[in-house]
Image (tube, grey):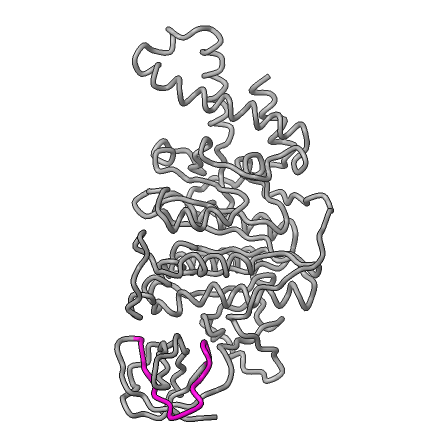
Amino acid sequence: MAQGVIRSIRDLVVRVQFDDNPPALNEMLFVENENKTPLMVSSLLTGNVAQCLNLRADHTIQKAMPVNRSGKGLEIPVGDALIGRVVDAMSRPIDGEAALDDPNLERRDILRAPARSNKFSAAKPEILETGIKVIDFFTPFVKGRKIGIIGGAGVGKTVLTMELINNIANSTGGLSFFAGVGERIREGHELYETLKERDLLKNTCMYFGQMDQNPLQRALIALSAVTGAEYFRDTQNKDILFFADNMYRYVQAKNEVSTLLEQVPNQGGYEPTIFSDVKTLQDRLSSTENGSITAVQTIYVPADDLSDPAVQMIQRELDSIIVLSRAVAEQGIRPAVDLNRTNSSLLSPEVVGERHYLLSVQVQALLQKYESLKGIIAIIGENELSAADRADYSKAKKLIEFFTQKMHVMENQSAAKGEDFTREDTLKGIEEIIV
């Protein structure tokens, strides 16, 4: 392979000059130094210059150092050896356990194209019960689909995700993947300890690129986790549960990398490639004839602004949206779900059945009426409403209280035992309120 020379270094951006035979886009280069510093080719400039990104933010590299081509992209190990492990974007262990350096482990390029399925499945959608009333009723958890948990800081996105991991992994015993994208180290440690305490690590692969990592590591961690999940789906024909916390941080990390590369942002202030960045990742979270990937993704909302372009972009790729509200959280309601903004394209008779669907229509009508009546009550008082309006208002209040629930993963903090509800329990409880 041809050898290049470092011509300039600016933060994570390194330009490497080649005399001939320049590298391919996304190819891995390695600096001839003690650390064998890995560089990823980001773009090719005129004059056989490769603009690269310094994956490990290694500041020991210097101008004029020789650089070797690898002829490959960023390949990471995949397979059974990753189960129960915690790794970074390059699949280097960060759990204090042995390195994953077995030469027999299959390695895959994390930037591979999404798998294409030629088989159309007409099978009835399979609903996975989560044990969480508000999710099972408003946003049915369907195998092979995507669900998003949207909210600002501190409204309970991570807690709800941890509860889903706990409940679904316990009930199905299937293989779970968790991608921690740009979140707090404390939250990652709490999740690890929770899974370990509940003996769920044996069915979980964890990938962390958290706040202390450089933006490139944070951007790549989601792609690394998806690559690992695809292996089990395609090679071992498994159905995968994929949890990502937080997808907004993925866009944010890509935006930071774009700024380093001095790319002109789009009108929303994000990187010019935001559409392809989101779309390419979401397309890989898909099902094939071999198996399925069911994805739960949290989405941070900056300044509680649901109209943020990045939030809107991610939302369009999801089947169901759970909106967590600060106003609801301030009322002491947990989970703090905004029942009027939460929605799902899967809440249809073909998926959930006629009974569930008709109940959802009635419940949504009552909740919307409740919102409109609140303003009137603030002026004239509840006693001035008609008997029918008072009855509907009372039912809506009971429904809001009904959808509160104690979480298993918060038992140590709240001293309250977690609750489980079947979908049948939830439907019966709603019928008792609204009939």
Seen from the viewer's position, the closer of residues 155 and 372 is 372
> Residue 334 falls in which quadrant of the image?
top left
Q: As displayed, is residue 248 above or below residue 33?
A: above
Residue 216: percent from the left, percent from the top? 38, 69
Q: Residue at x 53, y 69 (%)?
A: 85
Residue 172: percent from the left, percent from the top? 65, 51
Quadrant where the C terminus sits is top right
Is 21 one of the magenta-colored residues?
Answer: yes
> Residue 188 falls in which quadrant of the image?
bottom left
Residue 209: percent from the left, percent from the top? 41, 66
177 with respect to 188 (left or right): right
Q: Residue at x 50, y 50 (%)?
A: 317
Q: Residue at x 38, y 49 (%)?
A: 300
Q: As displayed, is residue 407 above or below residue 258?
A: above
Q: Residue furthest front?
A: 46
Residue bounds of the magenta highlight: 12-27
131 with respect to 315 (left or right): right
> Residue 55 falls in which quadrant of the image?
bottom left
